[in-house]
Amino acid sequence: MTPDRPLRADAARNRYALLKAASEEFAEHGLDASVADIARRAGIGKGTVFRHFPTKDVLLAAVVLDRIDGLALLARELLTAADPGAALLEFMESAAGRQRQLDLSFLRDAGGVNDLLDDTRSELFTAITALVDRAKGAGAIRPDITGMDVILLMCAPNYVVSFVPDAPSDLWRRYLGIIFDGLRPEGARPLPSVS
Amino acid sequence: MTPDRPLRADAARNRYALLKAASEEFAEHGLDASVADIARRAGIGKGTVFRHFPTKDVLLAAVVLDRIDGLALLARELLTAADPGAALLEFMESAAGRQRQLDLSFLRDAGGVNDLLDDTRSELFTAITALVDRAKGAGAIRPDITGMDVILLMCAPNYVVSFVPDAPSDLWRRYLGIIFDGLRPEGARPLPSVS
DNA sequence: TCCTAAGCGGACCGCGCGGTCAACTTGCTA
DNA sequence: TAGCAAGTTGACCGCGCGGTCCGCTTAGGA
């Protein structure tokens, strides 16, 4: 699918700097980060950005792909951890922590652009579901929780913290703690059925 | 502070239609809703929008003020409810439900524009804190929860649901259920201290 | 009924955005 | 080391945004 000859040395260097700059700029300014700012941060011209990625959306998808891939790798590693409940918590902590560098809500807007991204997202989903099933089997979390619940809820702490001006950088841990306690079997109430 | 003579009848009508249209448009498109679209929806000219509100930010603040005021009113009413725990849950449910019409994350971006908004936000905070203290007193929620926690967490369900394409309209109830269970005393773990 | 000030509206402005292009530079290969 | 394809660049384009302005309309008191 990509039998292209290898990039020229300078082009590879620029591409790397571009992805790094885009990741930082998206983290700071969200989807509103401008291509011009990204190019300036990477120390390259704006035209070069569009040579590497045909549109801003594709650039975003490439950045998001990196993140999702990293999370999927982590989830697979944690599948062999001794304590399944602790493994799930560690995964959610790591995911939330990484989100501070790149809000995963991008994956909501970056759909359909890149087939590879869709595949990697599926892998992430599979791995998380396995992680959740192990935790359920160990009785660490309530049985009515799904992998999708975990994916969605692990995005919440950073979101709610974004409402607080000058929040301490680890405030998200407080909300992840509360949310994870909501996943535990103790004191769990039946969840409302949805249509 | 506003000893202005009353609005002319047509101006009052337009102002009402404008606020309604702005509320709907902001709900559908977030901060990206354009003033031109809002004006069109209200059936008035763009210039008229700026006659009523000097900037888009002030218009947004007016819309948000309405919402916050309604929530503060509800919170005060629920202070006299028989079951403090159920009252808090009902408040969070109502708040989350209303958010589907207007994402409260706007209050993050609408700060400093309007003194009245800041005052109303304080009133909301006071009322929620009282609601939380009552629930704590009744043993319905764990003692380490604050009013701020509730304000922040009640915004989470709608956010996480926004990741799901074609989500059922009441999916947010599932996540509010999980989160509220995290507030309960049973099975609560000590929360990480934040710096 | 008439006069006037309050209200209205849409053409218009400057800006910054995503994206294009043709002239220029440079890493690689023979 | 010569030549060329690959890569770079920044001026430029069209667009839609928030916001302005002035000629027109109209509510409503005298």
Image (spheres, coloured by chain):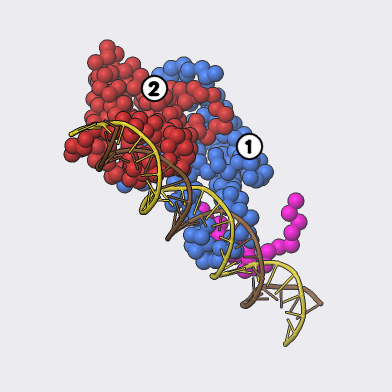
Chain colours: A red, B blue, C yellow, D brown
Mark 2 or 1, which is nearer the eye?
2
Quarter occupied by residue B164: top left
* Mark 2, secondary structure of its residue: helix
Q: Is B91 placed above or below B136 here?
A: below
Mark number, residue A55: none
Q: Which residue is mark 1?
A: B122
From what the image shows, is residue B194 above or below residue D2? above
In the image, the segment drawn in magenta is B1-24
Q: CA distance from mark 2 to mark 1?
A: 32 Å
Please tell me if label 2 and label 1 are on a single chain. Answer: no
Residue A88 part of the magenta segment: no
The answer to which of B13 and B89 lies nearer the viewer is B13
Question: Is disc 1 surrounded by few (<14), some (14 to 19) or many (20+) residues within 10 Å?
Answer: some
Quarter containing the N terminus of chain A? top left
Give the image location of residue B130, x and y in percent: 59, 31
Note whether residue A155 is visible.
no
Looking at the image, residue B124 lies above or below residue A70 = below
Q: Badge 1 sits on which subunit?
A: B
Is residue B9 rendered magenta in the image?
yes
Amino acid at circle 1: Ser
Q: Which residue is mark 2?
A: A93
